Structures are given as structure tokens and as C-alpha cells.
Amino acid sequence: MEYLSTALVLIFVMWLIDKHNVWKQTGKIALIVVAMAVIAGASIYGWAKYRDWKAERAALIQEEKHKAAVKECLSRIHGKTDVFDEAACEADPNVQTTEQCWTKPDAKTGVQFDRNSFKNLNGTPVPRDPNEPCYPLAHK
């Protein structure tokens, strides 16, 4: 039923065009409308492709920056502590390491503690007192 009503309207419009003999003007208008539709469609398609390319390029640049930050993190913490590894730098390239700071070795047993790993009973880290001296790790 919809097709029939559309066909009837189209037939009526064509009859009016034929009656008033305006085929050339109608053809020019139709050609202009089609050309504008093609230009608009191509512009929208091109803009969408450009937007996707730009987002992909930004993602690649971000990935390169992250790789450089991880590399810098690994070189910064290398040898300073044994708890950090590549996974820690991958998770957070801005992770801050603390210099190793050991307690004075016990005279009898030689036991030392890492001052940076002290925690209270709730499990939160206790900051070390900067006035207390740090000792090198004594190997026996």
C-alpha cells in the first residue's frame, strides 16, 4: 500500500513537470542534489576515516611513551631493590623506589632489618626516621 501511494505521488509530480515542460530545469536540480549528496557522503566517510586514523595514531604514541617510561623506570630502580621488577614498572612507570636502608647488624646473630619495610599493626607502612643512620647489608 505504501509503494502504491509513493508511485501515485511520483506519477503526479512527473505529470506536472511534463505539463509545464520544465524537464531541463528539473534535471539540473536533480543533478545538483545528487552531486551534493555524493559530496556530503564522501566528506562524512573521509572525516570518519581521519578520526579513526587520528585515534589509532594517538594510541600508538601513548604506547610508545609508556614503553619509554617503563624502560626509564627499570633503569632507575635497577640494583636499588630486589622487590621491584618489570611487572611493577609496567603497572606504574612512575613508581618511586627508596634506597635500601638497613638496621645495624646484631652483634651476636648478625640479623638486620630493612627500615623501609616496617609496618604498624594495621599493615600500613611506617616511614623511617631520616635521622637514623643506614647501614650496608652485611653478608656472612
Image: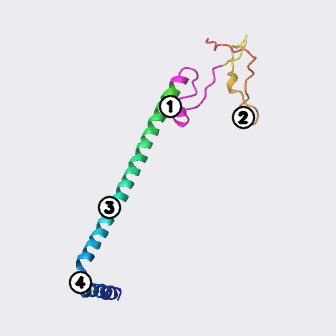
**Of the pair 16 and 106, the residue shown nearer to us:** 16
Residue kind at label 1, given as amino acid type: Ala
Residue bounds of the magenta highlight: 75-100
**Of the pair 128 and 118, the residue shown nearer to us:** 128
How busy is the neighbourhood of tag 4: few (under 14 within 10 Å), some, or many (20 plus)? few
Q: Are marks 2 and 3 in contact (CB under 8 Å)?
A: no
How busy is the neighbourhood of tag 2: few (under 14 within 10 Å), some, or many (20 plus)? few
Q: Nearer the viewer, mark 3 or mark 1?
A: 3
Question: Residue 33 lies in what quarter of the image?
Answer: bottom left
Disc 3 target residue = 39
Residue 138 located left or right of residue 128 = left
Earlier-in-chain disc, 3 versus 1? 3
Between marks 3 and 4, how big is the CA–CA gap?
A: 29 Å
Q: Nearer the viewer, mark 4 or mark 2?
A: 4
How busy is the neighbourhood of tag 1: few (under 14 within 10 Å), some, or many (20 plus)? some
Q: Nearer the viewer, mark 4 or mark 1?
A: 4
Earlier-in-chain disc, 4 versus 2? 4
